[in-house]
Image (cartoon, rainbow, N blue to C red):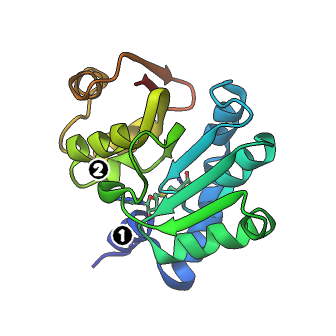
Amino acid sequence: MTILQKLIEQAKQPSGLIGSVMLRIMNVAHRGMTNWLMHSGLMKDGDIVLDIGCGGGRTVQALSNINHRGKIHGIDISEQAVNDTIKVNRYAVANGKVIVSQASVATIPYPDAFFDLITACQTHYFWADLASDVQEVYRVLKHGGQFVIMSEIYKINYHRKDYQTNGQLKQLLKNIGFQSITIQEHARKGWISVIATK
Ligand SMILES: C[S@@+](CC[C@H](N)C(=O)[O-])C[C@H]1O[C@@H](n2cnc3c(N)ncnc32)[C@H](O)[C@@H]1O
């Protein structure tokens, strides 16, 4: 395996010391997306939120800091990411405000219609079966709730063999049942945000 392949594997499912270092780097590198989310006005105080692919835990932390009455849940397929997210949010975890568990988007361990807002930052291009995974997101979202995807465009083009274009992604979300879908290109930064309302 080349060094590049090893780094890609670590981004897909971080593990061990190298994974932990990468998660810390991602916490900084993806700050622009997290900041956009914080200023988007999508989350209301009291919302029950899920961050899928929570990585190093920085998005969970930022959401938790401005949502005083709600709860922030994080899931990640990687044990290392779960441990690091718990570490970064240790006080909020201790008082029950933040709940983190190891799980895949393919089988989200929550009942139907549980969340007001679901976020997925720099992760959907790794999901094995996007159609069925997004269907699972839809299941746990409340009616009127919002699903937000943020992703660098070149990573979608590199990792995804399907649903590469905004049109294909929009059609997928529509087929699953989302009512309103907005895809915005942040051209200067090279990333997109997708807001889909159930
Ligand atoms: C590039 S990192 C992004 C982490 C974080 N969201 C951020 O913006 O810094 C991708 C994360 O998605 C997680 N991930 C990949 N596939 C997943 C899946 N099927 N279900 C849940 N998490 C997944 C990885 O373990 C990793 O922590």
Mark 2: is the Cβ under 8 angstroms from ligand 1? no
Q: Is residue 56 visible?
A: no
Residue 12 picture location, percent across and down:
39, 64
In the image, which disc is placed on residue 55?
Answer: none
Q: Position of residue 23 (x, y in %)?
A: 58, 66
Observer-nearest residue: 81 or 103? Answer: 103
Quadrant that contains the C terminus: top left
How many circles with numbers are drawn on the protein?
Answer: 2
Q: Which residue is mark 2?
A: 159
Alpha-carbon distance for marks 2 and 1?
Answer: 11 Å
| Disc 1 residue: CB within 8 Å of ligand 1 | no
Q: Amino acid at mark 2?
A: His
Q: Quadrant of ligand 1?
A: bottom left
**Picture residue at 32% right of the left edge, 69% below the top:** 5
**Crowding near the residue tagged with mark 2, few <14, some 14–19, many ≥20 C-alpha atoms within 10 Å:** some
- Label 1, secondary structure: give it: helix
- Quadrant position of residue 58: bottom right
Q: Residue at x 76, y 70 (%)?
A: 94
The N terminus sits in image quarter: bottom left
Left or right of residue 160: residue 93: right
Q: Kindly identify the residue that appears in the image at 66 percent across and 31 percent down.
A: 43
Please state which amino acid type lies under the numbered disc 1: Glu
Q: Earlier in the sequence, mark 2 or mark 1?
A: 1
The extreme bottom residue here reads 16
- Location of residue 20 with respect to 63 vertically, above or below: below
Residue under circle 1? 9
Q: Is residue 12 something that shows in the picture?
A: yes
Q: Position of residue 42 (x, y in %)?
A: 62, 26
Judge whether 127 appears above or below 112 on screen.
Answer: below
Element carrying mark 2? helix
